[in-house]
């Protein structure tokens, strides 16, 4: 059967186990008799079970978003075949950045972009980290009040890495030249030169996530950037959710993603017939 592929990039300091409940829910809910769904999970080099390139072990330049994108592209080339009819790229928080880079570089191959907790601004300060933690606390308290129950992530399992040192180097991609500020990020991916974005985009943001209103580079600002380029872009606000949305609310995140995938596939089929 033909199938749709979703390529996922993990959030900062998480491994691919982050997506466990999300992926299980998405696969279980996928309703198509003729089209299958394949979810490709991976750890960027240096994180989780992935290791740095031995030949470049002394080089820090292998820990870049560009390298991660090429690694993911090679991975897809090994698992994709002629039955793959579309590719969606997905990322959470830190992982939404390489997802955005991938879609920008391989726009002709991408059918849609799904970004959780998206921001391309500087978000490594103590104040910003504190805001994310406080937002997550408010979201959790609201879920308790409303009686919302979601699967609980195994923190030990989703934050396990072969080498903590290598993982730290891997996460430092946000500080590399070309990606160390919102302005530099947009210039590097060439968004300012793009007249029209060819694939639909959804940004899924927790109502208590400070990345929603961050400036520069927050999701509301990026919504305008995408729409200015005729992009079909949706901003979905996730109720009772803070930062690290897929970890805290995998079922809700999967439900919103499922709706986006179905709508995007329908539009793709219609446009193909026109």
Image: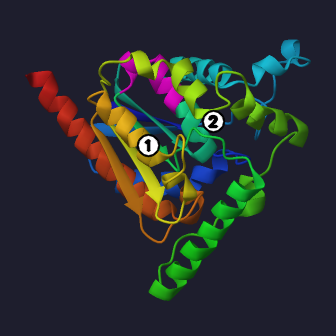
In the drawing, does residue 166 fall left or right of residue 212?
right
Percent from the top left, x then y, of residue 27?
Answer: 42, 51
Residue 108 is situated, as x and y percent measured from the top left of the image, at 36, 16
Give the alpha-carbon distance from disc 2 to disc 1, as whole Å.
29 Å
Height in image: 241 above or below 157? Answer: below
Label 2 vs label 1, nearer the camera = 1
Q: Quadrant of the N terminus?
A: top left
Density class for disc 1 (Cα within 10 Å; few <14, some 14-19, many ≥20) is some
Of 35 and 223, nearer the camera is: 223
Count of marks placed on residues: 2
Q: Residue at x 60, y 57 (%)?
A: 244
The residue drawn where x is 25% and y is 37% is 265
Q: Does the magenta stretch include residue 212?
A: no
In this rendering, is residue 14 above or below 8?
Answer: below
Provide the residue span drawn in magenta: 100-110
Residue 235 screen position, x and y as percent = 36, 50
| Secondary structure type for disc 1 | helix
Which quadrant of the view contains residue 2? top left
Q: Disc number at residue 221? A: 1
């Amino acid at each position: 059967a033909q199938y749709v592929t979703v390529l996922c990039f993990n959030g900062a300091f998480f491994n691919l186990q982050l997506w466990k409940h999300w992926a299980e829910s998405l696969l279980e809910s996928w309703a198509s008799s003729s089209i299958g769904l394949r979810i490709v999970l991976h750890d960027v080099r240096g994180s989780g079970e992935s290791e740095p390139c031995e030949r470049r072990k002394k080089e820090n330049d292998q820990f870049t978003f560009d390298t991660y994108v090429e690694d993911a592209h090679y991975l897809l080339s090994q698992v994709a075949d002629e039955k793959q009819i579309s590719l969606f790229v997905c990322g959470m928080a830190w992982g939404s950045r390489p997802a955005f880079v991938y879609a920008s570089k391989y726009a002709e191959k991408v059918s849609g972009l799904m970004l959780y907790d998206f921001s391309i601004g500087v978000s490594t300060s103590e104040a910003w980290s504190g805001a994310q933690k406080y937002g997550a606390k408010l979201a959790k308290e609201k879920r308790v009040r409303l009686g919302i129950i979601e699967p609980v992530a195994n923190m030990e399992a989703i934050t396990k890495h072969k080498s903590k040192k290598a993982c730290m180097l891997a996460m430092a991609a946000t500080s590399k030249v070309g990606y160390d500020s919102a302005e530099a990020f947009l210039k590097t991916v060439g968004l300012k030169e793009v007249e029209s974005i060819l694939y639909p985009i959804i940004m899924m943001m927790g109502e208590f996530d400070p990345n929603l209103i961050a400036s520069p580079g927050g999701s509301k600002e990026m919504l305008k950037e995408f729409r200015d380029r005729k992009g079909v872009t949706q901003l979905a606000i996730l109720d009772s959710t803070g930062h690290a949305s897929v970890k805290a609310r995998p079922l809700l995140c999967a439900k919103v993603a499922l709706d986006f995938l179905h709508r995007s596939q329908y539009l793709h089929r219609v446009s193909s017939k026109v």
